[in-house]
């Protein structure tokens, strides 16, 4: 490849040919291509190998590919929940002024989007009982990691221990450990008692070296945590930050985390506004006003313009603050603004009564399905003697992974969480298939 060929089609390269030669000479290579070791087999040969097709042809091919998927009804949960997304969410969120907006640095051209994000923050403030919410985080796992970092910054005494539930979902814990490693923090478990925190055991391991205690309600097994107040008191006694994980649906009917002493609330806000996307999330992050300048990510503030009219702008934090390496509040340099917009639209479309009604349906649905499965020989449901939201654990006399595989062949997906336990999640999107699921359980366990 000649030098002229290498530079063809690169109008953004800021170097003259003599400058490029000087730099290559300085590092002892003959060409830009020599800087990269790309195997011959994967080098671009000038063709993508994709046959041109019409729009109709592309649609037909995609239909054929998607038709190869198995038809399966999911009763899966453990942090990812499928709720019906009203069509108004797509219609409004797909407007060009929202889709074409990146991050709203220029308030004079982004008032509509900024107001929507301010409303999203306001919704989270109401649901959590805390004074400040951002807009927003990548997902619950990164929000938890940022909460741990915030704890290490604001705690006045030394300490490196972050305590989390022993049942914490593995992916969420893995992200937290990545965050903790860079900050010199250590993640440790505390025990459970019937899928809630074992408060006595937690009290035995908390000391002044603990910077953060994390609890979830609902827990990963769908149980409502009954010891939030006690956990919050333990954290307060040892000057540790108390972080609670939840989601907007559950928060509409549960005690506000702030009332239990929470300093930070994190979780998946994308349970509303997002269809199941197997990886895409939206992390909520709310905290006390005293930590306002420690909040990671974006904050929208309300003020007044030169004419005294209400106006919105990104406030307190700038993009530059997030590229200051070890001196930065956070190294998250973007956010999920459009996804937060979708969540705000969904919550607004439900309204307070609709949100509470949805949450109550999630409680009743789990209770009713557990009772029906409990009536089948060989199934004990729910395992935990607790109130549940959306999901519950069932014990089986048979090998749980085998039962899950048999159910999948019958068209239903559930979690096998160990050799004898299955976890089932129900929402309004799969509620009409519960009869089929119960019948499949009966057939599999014959």
Image (cartoon, rainbow, N blue to C red):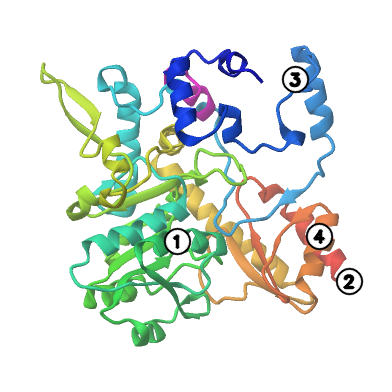
Seen at 77% across and 11% down, the residue is: 54
Mark 4 secondary-structure assignment:
helix
Q: Is residue 307 above or below residue 169?
A: above
In the image, is 110 to the left or to the right of 72? left
Name the quadrant containing residue 53: top right
The Cα–Cα distance between marks 2 and 1, rounded to whole angstroms, is 43 Å
x and y percentages locating residue 342 in the rendered image: 46, 34
Residue 27 is labelled as none
Residue 49 magenta: no
**What residue is pinned by disc 3?**
47
Name the quadrant containing residue 318: top left
The Cα–Cα distance between marks 4 and 3, rounded to whole angstroms, is 45 Å
| Mark in front: 2 vs 4 | 4
x and y percentages locating residue 37 in the rendered image: 64, 38
Residue 446 is labelled as 2
Mark 1 secondary-structure assignment:
helix
Residue 407 is labelled as 4
Mark 2 secondary-structure assignment:
loop
In the image, is 122 to the left or to the right of 398? left
The Cα–Cα distance between marks 2 and 3, rounded to whole angstroms, is 57 Å
Seen at 62% across and 76% down, the residue is: 383
The Cα–Cα distance between marks 2 and 4, rounded to whole angstroms, is 13 Å
| Mark in front: 1 vs 3 | 3
The Cα–Cα distance between marks 4 and 1, rounded to whole angstroms, is 33 Å
| Mark in front: 2 vs 1 | 1
Mark 3 secondary-structure assignment:
loop
- Magenta region: 89-97
**What residue is pinned by disc 1?**
176
């Amino acid at each position: 490849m000649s030098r002229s060929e290498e530079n063809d089609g690169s109008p953004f390269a800021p170097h003259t040919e003599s400058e490029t030669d000087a730099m290559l000479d300085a590092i002892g290579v003959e060409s830009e291509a020599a800087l990269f070791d790309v195997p011959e087999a994967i080098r671009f040969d000038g063709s993508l190998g994709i046959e041109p097709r019409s729009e109709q042809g592309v649609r037909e091919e995609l239909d054929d590919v998607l038709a190869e998927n198995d038809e399966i009804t999911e009763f899966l949960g453990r942090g990812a929940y499928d709720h019906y997304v009203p069509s108004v969410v797509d219609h409004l969120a797909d407007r060009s002024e929202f889709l074409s907006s990146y991050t709203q640095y220029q308030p004079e051209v982004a008032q509509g989007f900024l107001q929507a994000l301010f409303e999203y923050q306001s919704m989270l403030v109401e649901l959590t009982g805390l004074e400040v919410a951002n807009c927003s985080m990548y997902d619950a796992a990164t929000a938890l990691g940022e909460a741990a970092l915030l704890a290490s910054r604001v705690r006045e005494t030394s300490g490196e221990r972050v305590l989390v539930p022993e049942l914490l979902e593995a992916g969420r814990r893995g992200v937290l450990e990545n965050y903790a490693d860079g900050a010199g923090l250590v993640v440790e478990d505390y025990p459970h008692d019937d899928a809630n925190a074992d408060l006595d055991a937690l009290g035995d391991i908390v000391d002044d070296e603990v910077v953060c205690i994390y609890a979830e309600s609902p827990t990963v097994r769908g149980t409502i945590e009954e010891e939030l107040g006690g956990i919050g008191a333990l954290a307060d006694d040892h000057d540790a930050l108390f972080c609670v994980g939840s989601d907007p649906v559950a928060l509409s009917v549960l005690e506000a985390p702030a009332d239990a002493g929470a300093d930070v609330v994190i979780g998946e806000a994308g349970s509303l506004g997002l269809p199941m996307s197997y990886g895409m999330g939206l992390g909520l992050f709310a905290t006390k006003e005293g930590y306002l300048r420690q909040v990671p990510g974006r904050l929208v503030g309300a003020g007044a313009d030169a004419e005294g009219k209400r106006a919105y702008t990104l406030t307190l934090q700038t993009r530059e603050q997030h590229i200051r390496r070890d001196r930065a509040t956070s190294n998250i340099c973007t956010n999920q603004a459009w996804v937060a917009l979708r969540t705000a639209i969904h919550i607004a479309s439900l309204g307070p009564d609709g949100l509470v009604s949805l949450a109550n349906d999630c409680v009743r649905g789990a209770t009713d399905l557990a009772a029906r499965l409990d009536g089948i020989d060989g199934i004990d449901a729910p395992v935990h003697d607790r109130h549940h939201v959306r999901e519950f654990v069932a014990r089986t006399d048979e090998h749980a992974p085998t039962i899950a595989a048999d159910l999948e062949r019958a068209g239903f997906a559930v979690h096998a969480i160990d050799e004898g336990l299955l976890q089932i999640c129900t929402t309004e999107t799969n509620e009409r298939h519960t009869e089929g699921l119960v019948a499949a359980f009966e057939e599999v366990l014959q």
